[in-house]
Amino acid sequence: AVLLVCAGASAAVFPELPPSAMGRKVEVELRVPLTASGFEKLTAALAPTLTPDLRIDSYLDSHDGARFVLKRLDPPLKVRVKDDGTALKVQVSQPTAKETVTDGGLSATVTTIESRQTSLPRREASELSRSLDAFFTALPGDAPIEALAAEAGRMMDGSSWEGKDLVSAAAPSARLLPAARSEKQRRRVRIPLDDGSILEAVLGLTRALDERGRPVTLYELEAETAERDPAELKALARRLLNALRRLGLSPADLGGLSPDAFVFTESRLRGER
């Protein structure tokens, strides 16, 4: 049986899988943040897949007693536990290059990301899932969360996952604690480009919290491609922006919110509400 982990839901039941590590992976992400109007226009124009891919991402960060450390590094180091209902995966990632490409008033970010990912064995996955659920269910409320955060951190410390050494080296005296959670819905789309090629992408809707713990909804268009010459990546980003313009998007359809739920969790860990 498979249950998707959501805040307040019972813990997921995962199939028995051996622990596995993907090792180092490098890929390039093309991302266009959207407003609700941009999301609606692309949904109407691109006829995305009817059934979305669902995933819960729980972000963790090293906390030094006052604030989270890893996200403030240059470049930031990201630790997240990804749950698609079939497996729980720990991913550690860091951008190695990032550039914004603008064309005709529209903009896309092109980010090269190095990542390491590990699938946790069933027992560890189920226990960690329950612990993270308990923390993120309590996070928006008024009850103390320090003990729940520490429990999730202990479980991460007790697990074996790729990139753990990078996290320890980056913040050796800080504790790894849960920081934020997002619920993602992704629908696959195919975008015709002006050179005759088709770009496979995902149209995404994400539910998260903002700096004050209020629920927000974010929208984006995202595509992944292999690492290649920077000039080729810029050209691909421009072709994507040209395609979006042909589909009726204007600068007003791009952008949207940029909330930082880590700030809210920091305040809750200090006992504030």
Image: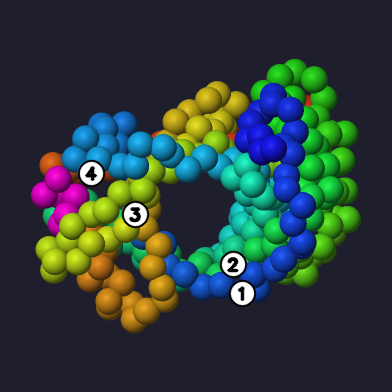
Determine the residue positioned at 31% across, 72% down.
233
Mark found first going from the N terminus, 1 or 2: 1
Residue identifier under label 4: 46
Give the mark nearer the N terminus: 3 vs 1. Answer: 1
Q: Are marks 2 and 4 in contact (CB under 8 Å)?
A: no
Name the kind of residue labelled 1 in the image: Arg
Callout 1: few (<14), some (14-19), or many (20+) C-alpha neighbours within 10 Å? few
Residue at the farthest bottom position: 229
Q: Residues within 10 Å of mark 3 (few under 14, many from 20)?
A: many
- Marks 1,2: beta carbons within 8 A: yes
Q: Does the magenta-highlighted stretch encompass residue 174?
A: no
**Residue 201: which numbered mark, if any?**
3
Identify the magenta region. 241-247
Q: Is residue 47 left or right of residue 95?
A: left
Q: Nearer the viewer, mark 3 or mark 2?
A: 3
The residue carrying pointer 2 sits among few (fewer than 14), some (14 to 19) or many (20 or more) residues within 10 Å by Cα, namely many
Which three-letter amino acid code belongs to the residue tagged 4? Leu
**Numbered circle sitting on residue 24:** 1
- Which of disc 2 and disc 3 is earlier in sequence? 2
**Mark 2, mark 4: which one is toward the viewer?**
4
Asked if the residues shown at circle 4 and circle 1 are in contact, with their CB atoms under 8 angstroms apart, the answer is no
Q: Which residue is nearer to you in this view: 50 or 154?
A: 50
Estimate the x, y position of residue 184 in percent, counting from the top left: 50, 39
